[in-house]
Image: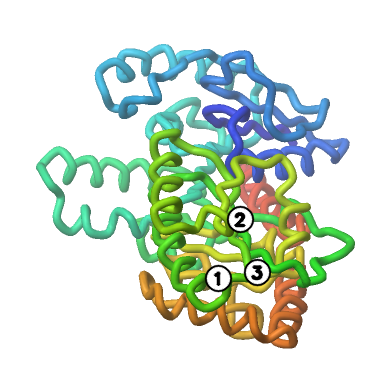
Amino acid sequence: MKILFVIDQVYLHGGIERVLSIKANYFAAQDDNEIHIITTEQKDNKPCYDFSTKISFQDIGVNYNRTKSYFHPINLLKLPKHVSKIRSAIKNIQPDVVVVCSHSTDTYFMPFVVKSVPKVKEFHFSKFIEEQPRKNPRNILKKYFFKFTDFVEKKYDKLIILNNNESGYYKTDNTVVIPNPLTFYPDSVSELKDKIVISAGRIAPVKGFDILIDIWELVHQKNKDWELHIYGDGDQGYVEMLQDKINQKGLQHNLILKGSTDNVKSKMLSSSIYAMSSHNECFPLVLLEAQSCGLPIISFDCPHGPRSIINEENGCLVELYHKEEFSEKLLALMSNPEQLKAFGANARENASNFEVKKVMDMWQDMFNSLIFKNVQP
């Protein structure tokens, strides 16, 4: 099978890039597969995750201005070049299936490029964020843009969504639920003895780290023995704003912005609780990683990912933005080692449901259905 994955880049740390490395490497390890990855703006950077040497990479150098919308005139002028180069690359590679990974301009024209090849679109964000704008579009252009996206999505052979809750946001019948696979499943788990709460992710407003700072202030008033470590990077101005908030609350000695890490697994194994304060998520891979390390999780019950991973046996879901309840759940776990261990053991067991082979078998079945259908007389 010849599989082509299309993505904007693979040099920045992120969930989409990490999951792509797992999928591509898994299929590349099978002798009868040929794997290609096309990027639009790799800019001669090395991939940030390990990819098999069997995988063929090609960067077509569109290089959009990422400080502006893809629909800004300066970027729209690059669209003809993008379409032409993608069409040419697909004709040269002659893949059995094309998978669009990132939500860039490829999304909107790929169904109409080389129509004979089955095409798949992955969605790594929750369409919950479109619910209110769809009901009350701010202008006529926005209204018709949503109609256009619905039209485009119907043209894909399959749309891959990460949890069942997302299906209600789509106007099509071509959705398939395939969760993210685990990136690792360590031989050992955390001993849950270190008094560290960990959180990780892109340092951006959607992750709610500013709210987590408020929650930690409430925790610290009653328990000064524990630390909160936040891993990740983002816009420098936003990071500085968070640090200023930490300093103003006098939490700088036990709430630490640790920056990015290439080994989040070791950081999790040296922690005892994972905390997530996001405004919305689709299927947060980091929660599976935490569970694989045997960490209990406390998370906001945000739309819609955490509830697909966390249950009352392995952690706690807190009503969105209820800071006091979140802090109380943290304090309760900190003071109850037996509950901590029970949650951790159940978390580890739950994570095993998302081991790579189990998830990749779902991808294989989906590919087979498309290719088999495509070759029928």
Q: Residues within 10 Å of mark 3 (few under 14, many from 20)?
A: many
Kindly identify the residue that appears in the image at 72 percent across and 38 percent down. Answer: 24
Give the percent coordinates (x, y) of residue 258.
61, 45
Where residue 25 appears, as percent x and y from the top left, is 77, 39
Residue type highlighted by circle 2 = His
Q: Viewer-proximal residue, 85 or 252?
A: 252
Near mark 2 (Cα within 10 A), the count class, few <14, some 14-19 or many ≥20, is: many
Residue in the foreground of this view, choosing between 225 and 204: 225
Tell me where residue 321 sits by quadrant: bottom left
User: Marks 1/2: CA distance?
Assistant: 25 Å
Give the quarter of the figure containing the N terminus. Answer: top right
Instruction: Report the label total.
Output: 3
Q: Which residue type does callout 3 highlight? A: Ile
Q: Position of residue 79 (x, y in %)?
A: 37, 18
Instruction: Tell me which numbered mark, 1 or 2, is placed earlier along the sequence.
Output: 2
* Secondary element type, mark 3: strand
Q: Which residue is mark 2?
A: 229
Element type where label 2 sits in the image: strand
The label on residue 273 is 3
